[in-house]
Image (cartoon, coloured by chain):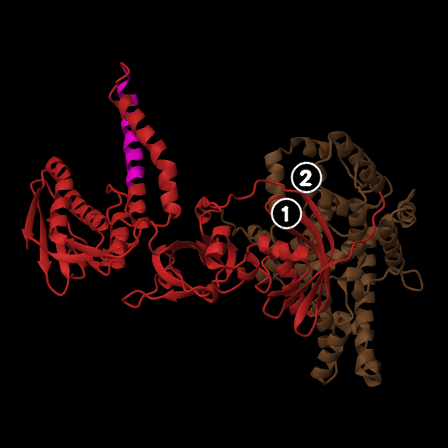
Amino acid sequence: MASTAPDPIRGSVDEHGRLVRADPPLARLQEAAGSRLGAVLAVPQLSDIARLARQLGVTLSRPALAATDSADLDLWVRAEPLADRVELAIESWIERPARGARWPLADLADPPSTSATPAFTTDAELRLLTLTPAAATLLAATAAEALGQPLTGLLDLRPDPDGSLPLLTAVALRREFTGQRAAIRSSGAELLVAGEPRLSPDGGFAGLQCQLSSRDSPPVETATASFDALLREPLDVIVDEAERIADKAEGPLRSDYAAYATDIAGAARHLLEVLQAMGQEAATSGRPERIDLAELALEAAGLVQAQASEAGVTLDIDGVPTLSTLGQPRQVTQILVNLIGNAIRHSPASGVVRITSEAGAMASVTVADQGPGVAPADAERIFERFEQVEPQGVGAGLGLAISRRLAQQMGGNISLESKAGEGARFTLSLPLA
Amino acid sequence: MVEAQPTAVLEWSRRAARAHAAGMNGRLATAMTDFLLDPAERLSEQERALMTSMLAALIGGLAEELALRLGPNAAAHVDADVLMDRLRAAGLLGRPRLIALLLRRSWLIRSRDLPGEGGTALLQGFAGDRDPAVASAAMAVVLARASNRDRFGRPGLSLSDCDAETAVDLTYAVAAAFDTDGEEALVAAAVDLLARHDEGERLEALEARLVLAIDQAGRLDAAGLLAMAARGEVGLLAEALARIARIPAEAAWSMLMRRDEPALGQLLRLAEQPRTVAAGLIAALTNRLALADPASAIAGFDAMTPSEATAVRSRLRLPSLFKAARAVLQGDGQHRA
């Protein structure tokens, strides 16, 4: 079949390596590479050719390979350096079936949101990349109008009472966030933004993926909550079946097989704890309410009494009988359960865990144990997600990180006083009501 | 992009360096290195003569072009032989891409003198192809090959035969070798000369474009490969196999030409050719490439597993500078896994 030479696919790369102009196929390839028109040319071999042409100052004409998620591309590229740019002319563009498996995209980067979920993603400069129809409706803007716009052009971000902007804190610290107050510029309607950062393969900040909800709506479902729903039931089944096997409920079984089943059940329960801990954080939203911190401390102690008894540890409740504060009762209880549970795990047999409620500048509950304590070098590290001072310790390592974040979202904090060998004192502080 | 330094040059330079390091005087060290070089790796006298001729033509042509831009006074002081000696003594001619180009061109020239050569017949057939893209690409190759000889029919080389990196390096080196004052004028002349350089006009680039056109016309098939091999169009064949195997063209050329029969078989495996086609290609290339043991070529083809092919392909697609550095380090025993 006769073929004629097609017109070259053209583009321009400026002196900073940015693809400032591109014919549609090249623009699409740039987007497939994770960038966009106006940003740095992200197709590696094209970028190399453009850079070399600029460095050498002579025209290059050579082959290049590129790839999309479904095809390999054979390109013949001509790069002509000009005063302030390099002109690219791709004179041959041949698509072939992809050779070899592609690296799978990280599922967590793309939560299973539906078009019914008001959600959007941004690039590293917080310009909108994608927008679900529900979000477009909520923002009273079409995708064509909104995409490429700065987020702050559509939303007026409102600071918390303490002046913080959770969204910006999340950007800076590469963490999830919830409860970012915002007003839609076009209508003034107030809503809440929750989300998490998107990271590039090298760990750099690549943007945000966010969900919108009205201020009075139920908590927004984040990626972690989605996984909770997806994984909890199968994990429950695994635990149930593994425990049945371990109990030899179906008849005689080799002891080592029963031990395996016990291990399986334990691991599945651990995963359930992880989901629960992550779900607690995701569920935080809404305004704090008046609660009795001392009563919640008593309640939390009751929830872990069985664990304490099994470990031979005594729980000693002390301090004021009532303590009015502002917070979310469910989250406060979870924080205290985490703190007291940790204290029990690190206490020696016959040890005492003292739980003291006090009113000062803030309302506080201090959980003190007689365990090995925390070295000063680890004092902050233990609050980082997945960090554990004792690598062999039980628990997901999520409790302290999430507990502190929950406390901070309620206007409080968790602090630590400890020296190695002298026990640890964790204090939950919340605003007085 | 150069796949790797030609083996003979690399080994020679290593031995020479070691000899000098051992404190031997220059003549003795050089003679020792040259005398002990593997005969199979040594350049033939014909190769050496062709390469020297082409290099002299390249340096001389560059010098003339620069002199024209510097003015009549400069032209009177240019002696191409002196320039070449200065560049050689300073080590400025030991550029892998340049030597690889000289080697390749010398082989192409010698192969066209072989009896029964019919490469131009195949090329002329492409030049008259019904597909206009193939025809125009083939015509460009024909013209480029014809321009590789001077008015006396001697093989030549010019700046337009060099890739961009070599062109820039060599132009500035020749300019720097001029025995005149006025560095700014020299640089300006070099810049002006390079402004006209377009590596897309090289013979190798034009051959790649021809193969691309043949591929786009859907005719880069077994019959096409066998015709290239039978007609001695080894340059086109290397480009074709590289396209099919998705490896750099220089890598395919190296695997074809380095007198390593198993490597030839592996190249055909990388290009995913059926065994019958591979055998036919090996047979067609036996005389052209002077294969001493064609059976080991097909053995190399048979022995390569799919996973090995994947691993080799991945390695061949690594940046050439990285591979060159690894080759040097491995040769000096410094490689670590």
| Residue located beneath label 2 in the image | B270
Packing grade of label 1 (10 A; few <14, some 14-19, many >=20) is some
Horizontal and vertical percent position of residue A183? 40, 63
Q: Is residue B141 left or right of residue A227?
A: right
Q: Is residue A431 left or right of residue A81?
A: left
Residue sitting at x 27%, y 67%: A162
Secondary element type, mark 2: helix
Q: Quadrant of the N terminus of chain B?
A: bottom right
Residue sitting at x 90%, y 47%: B129
The chain letter corresponding to brown is: B
Amino acid tagged 2 = Leu
Of residue A73 and residue B74, the one placed in the foreground of this image is A73
Packing grade of label 2 (10 A; few <14, some 14-19, many >=20) is many
Horizontal and vertical percent position of residue B65? 82, 74
The chain letter corresponding to red is: A
**Do the CB atoms of the residues marked 1 and 2 lie less than 8 Å apart?**
yes
| Residue located beneath label 1 in the image | B316
Same chain for marks 1 and 2? yes
Task: Say if B298 sits above or below A186 in the image.
Answer: above
| Disc 1 to disc 2, C-alpha distance | 11 Å
Q: Chain of mark 1?
A: B
Of residue A137 and residue A36, the one placed in the foreground of this image is A137
Q: Which residues are magenta?
A: A253-273
Give the mark, 1 or 2, whose residue is nearer the N terminus.
2
Secondary element type, mark 1: helix
Q: Is residue A145 left or right of residue B184?
A: left
The answer to if A262 sits in the magenta stretch is yes
Q: Is residue A166 left or right of residue A316?
A: right
Amino acid tagged 1 = Leu
Residue B267 is drawn in which quadrant? top right
